[in-house]
Image: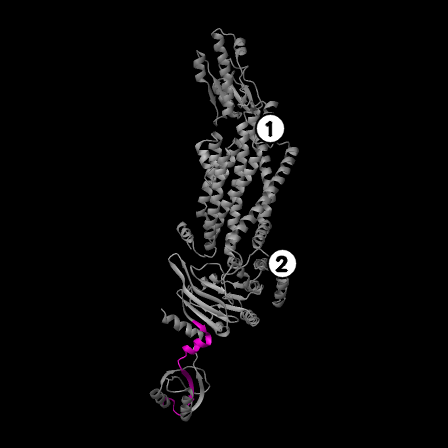
């Protein structure tokens, strides 16, 4: 036990003192916040650009309907000839030319409007134009058929379905998004942690092998202790790094927001919030939804799945590190690690959000290699306690089994030099 | 004499390959025990079994008449052939870490390290990183770490590789001193002249089997063929050669002399003693050289291995 503590301490210090580690710890939040600021800034830049569109309206119907907006400025070329209009659009480098020919019927007209442009025009601009023309034509059609426009306008109904559960509690329409954000963040965080620090464990094993210090060490400590010490020490370094990232990132983001007035909210979120017309009630419902999440269960299960998932994967990483002589050789063994991780994330983001309790989601939240990620994503939607129990039991069982296997490969592998092992070879090592 | 270490019929297989088959050795307390054998014979496997790095499939190991158990790790100091240190850690830090892994307290480890660093005059290396040291320098640090916890049993696998002759000598003297202070040493090497110089017992392993072991002097006695190397000043060398050739089994010998001598090796059968040979020779010529041919470890090694092919 004393030795394990020594190993954990050394591994932790070795990781933390590493120059790359230090640089990454302090640079990553800067880069992250910088990127967000840059993207937001670029997006605003793009939106500020005003596009000039010329129109050539032979019917003369629409002239007053094309109203300038923040993004589009309309220019009337109807008094020129079509060819002249085209030439001046090209000459003045306008965005495009809208040509509305004169036709017998509105139906015919609707089919024959053209837009000339060098590049394929922006979809939203086209939609905008189509909407204007369609609205005008529809109103004309109504009038032709003798309908009262005001009567039509006043007969339109607006529906907003209120969502309530059976015990009468109101929930927000964003409810499943809120759940997904919580679950998704937890799952994604776990995956990132496994990949970053699992790799670090692997590199540290390879380093000991390459330095040829390994035999000196395992003449003093059990290989299993060394492996465990490495995994634990590295995870502590990882937790420290993540904590610093969270802290620095938060501070920097706050600074960036207040200094440059940049809205750090991701674009998707902004839109979906905007959809709700910013209604006070909706925001309150979202907050209620968050509070209604099984927060205690969420935190506890996050800890369990986080520790379990990390142990499971990092012992595989350690075994791979032991099996190879250099990092380049490790590539061939990365597949069994990356595949289940990716599968977990994909199942999480596609199946769980669609149907959190469907067969696919349930099965993948039971399989040990994907369960940490998928189950974490399912839990906010409410999972039966016995399902979680089965999943955790399976996870713990496979941790014991996999670390045992990994430990065997590790024990043999660390003393093998100069061989590029195959899966077949690794299988043989299990029997040594 | 009691044995500090006893390996009893150890067998180790890796899959279908047998690395060690039924090997038994006894290492007497206070001896320097040479573990010899060609490359791939199974020496490292045996050493790893003694260090509890690998477990034998069959057989067991006794240290001080006790079956080997995890606590024995601190009674053994092992300098492996494949050895290195953490490149980016400082010398002192890393020596402290390795010493603590062997069960020394931090303070104890520091005191003893100070003693050894002073002894080797390397105190100024304490804050250097291993990557700044040369290979020989790093080897010195490894040697210190191996012996620091004062183990009963020291296992050195090629301890002199990487050392210049002066430093190799320093290390050799340290090994001898540790032996005199009561440690038992197992010494594995391909350098037969150092076996000759240091070992009092040897075991020879070949193709996973032990083919020879015992006290080095006993082995030599067994391997000597009652042959004497003789240098004679005669009036006529070829006549003398003729006479000797009729009476004895002789082979030519080669050694350096300043005058023209007849140089031969004479192998005696059981009927004649060395004294009788000497008086026979001194009657006929002036005996300038007369010594028994004792086989070197090198010769024993090669002969035993080829006989067992």
Q: Are marks 1 and 2 on the same chain?
A: no
Quadrant including the C terminus of chain B: bottom left
Q: Is residue A333 above or below residue B114?
A: above
Query: Residue A94, image x and y in percent?
Result: 53, 25
Query: Residue A104, image x and y in percent?
Result: 43, 11
Query: Residue B141, image x and y in percent?
Result: 57, 63
- Neighbour class for label 2 at 10 Å: few (<14), some, many (≥20)? few
Subunit bearing disc 1 = A
Q: Secondary structure at mark 1?
A: helix
Residue at the limit of the structure toward the left, as seen here: B246
Q: Is residue A21 above or below residue A39?
A: below
Q: Which residue is mark 1?
A: A287
Q: Could you give the CA–CA distance between mark 1 and mark 2, rounded to whole angstroms?
A: 54 Å
Q: What span is colored magenta in the figure?
A: B213-238
- Neighbour class for label 1 at 10 Å: few (<14), some, many (≥20)? some
Numbered badge on residue B106:
2
């Amino acid at each position: 036990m004393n030795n394990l503590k020594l190993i954990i301490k050394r591994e932790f210090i070795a990781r933390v003192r590493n120059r790359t580690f230090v640089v990454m710890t302090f640079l990553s939040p800067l880069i992250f916040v910088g990127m967000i600021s840059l993207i937001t800034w670029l997006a605003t830049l793009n939106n500020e650009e005003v596009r000039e569109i010329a129109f050539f309206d032979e019917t003369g119907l629409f002239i007053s309907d094309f109203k300038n907006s923040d993004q589009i400025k309309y220019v009337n070329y109807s008094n020129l000839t079509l060819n002249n209009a085209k030439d001046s659009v090209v000459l003045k480098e306008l965005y495009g030319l809208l040509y509305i020919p004169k036709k017998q019927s509105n139906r015919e007209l609707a089919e024959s409007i053209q837009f000339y442009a060098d590049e394929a025009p922006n979809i939203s601009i086209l939609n905008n134009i189509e909407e204007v023309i369609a609205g005008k034509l529809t109103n004309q059609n109504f009038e032709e058929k003798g309908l009262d426009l005001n009567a039509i306008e006043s007969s339109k109904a607006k529906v907003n379905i209120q969502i309530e559960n059976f015990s009468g509690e109101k929930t927000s329409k964003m409810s499943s998004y809120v759940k997904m954000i919580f679950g998704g963040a937890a799952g994604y965080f776990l995956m990132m942690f496994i990949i970053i620090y699992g790799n670090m464990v692997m590199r540290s094993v390879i380093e000991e092998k390459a330095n040829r210090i390994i035999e000196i060490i395992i003449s003093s400590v059990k290989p299993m202790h060394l492996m465990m010490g490495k995994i634990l020490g590295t995870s502590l370094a990882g937790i420290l790094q993540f904590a610093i990232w969270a802290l620095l990132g938060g501070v920097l983001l706050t600074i960036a927001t207040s200094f440059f007035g940049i809205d750090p909210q991701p674009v998707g979120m902004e839109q979906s919030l905007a959809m709700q017309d910013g209604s006070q009630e909706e925001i309150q419902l979202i907050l209620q939804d968050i509070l209604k999440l099984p927060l205690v269960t969420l935190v506890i299960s996050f800890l369990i799945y986080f520790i379990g998932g990390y142990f499971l994967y990092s012992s595989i990483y350690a075994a791979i590190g032991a099996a190879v002589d250099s990092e380049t050789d490790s590539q061939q063994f990365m597949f069994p690690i990356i595949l289940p991780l990716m599968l977990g994330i994909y199942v999480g983001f596609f199946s769980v959000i669609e149907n959190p309790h469907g067969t696919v989601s349930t099965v993948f939240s039971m399989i040990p290699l994907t369960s940490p990620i998928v189950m974490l994503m399912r839990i906010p939607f409410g999972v039966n306690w016995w399902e979680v129990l089965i999943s955790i039991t399976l996870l713990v069982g496979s941790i014991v089994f996999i670390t045992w296997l990994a430990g065997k490969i590790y024990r043999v592998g660390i003393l093998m030099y100069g061989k590029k092992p195959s899966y077949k070879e690794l299988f043989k090592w299990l029997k040594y | 004499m009691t044995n500090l270490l006893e390996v009893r019929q150890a067998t180790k297989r890796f899959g279908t390959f047998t690395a060690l088959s039924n090997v038994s050795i006894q290492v007497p307390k206070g001896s320097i025990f040479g573990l010899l054998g060609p490359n791939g014979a199974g020496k490292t496997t045996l050493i790893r079994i003694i260090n509890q790095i690998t477990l034998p499939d069959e057989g067991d190991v006794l240290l001080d008449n006790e079956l080997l158990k995890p606590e024995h790790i601190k009674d053994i100091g092992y300098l492996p052939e494949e050895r290195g240190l953490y490149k980016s850690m400082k010398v002192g830090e890393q020596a402290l870490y390795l010493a603590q892994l062997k069960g020394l307290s931090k303070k104890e480890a520091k005191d003893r390290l100070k003693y050894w660093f002073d002894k080797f005059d390397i105190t100024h290396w304490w804050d250097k990183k291993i990557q700044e040291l040369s290979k020989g320098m790093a080897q010195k640090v490894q040697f210190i770490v191996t012996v620091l916890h004062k183990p009963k049993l020291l296992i050195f696998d090629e301890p002199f590789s990487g050392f210049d002759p002066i430093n190799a000598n320093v290390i050799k003297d340290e090994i001898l001193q540790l032996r005199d202070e009561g440690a038992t040493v197992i010494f594995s090497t391909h350098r037969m002249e150092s076996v000759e110089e240091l070992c009092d017992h040897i075991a020879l392993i070949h193709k996973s089997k032990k083919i020879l072991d015992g006290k080095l002097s006993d082995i030599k006695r067994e391997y000597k063929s009652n042959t004497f190397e003789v240098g004679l000043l005669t009036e006529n060398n070829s006549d003398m050669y003729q006479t000797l050739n009729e009476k004895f089994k002789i082979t030519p010998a080669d050694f350096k002399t300043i005058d023209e001598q007849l140089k031969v090796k004479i192998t005696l059968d059981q009927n004649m003693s060395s004294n009788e040979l000497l008086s026979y020779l001194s009657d006929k010529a002036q005996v300038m050289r007369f010594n028994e041919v004792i086989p070197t470890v090198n010769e024993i090694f090669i002969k035993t291995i080829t006989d067992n092919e």
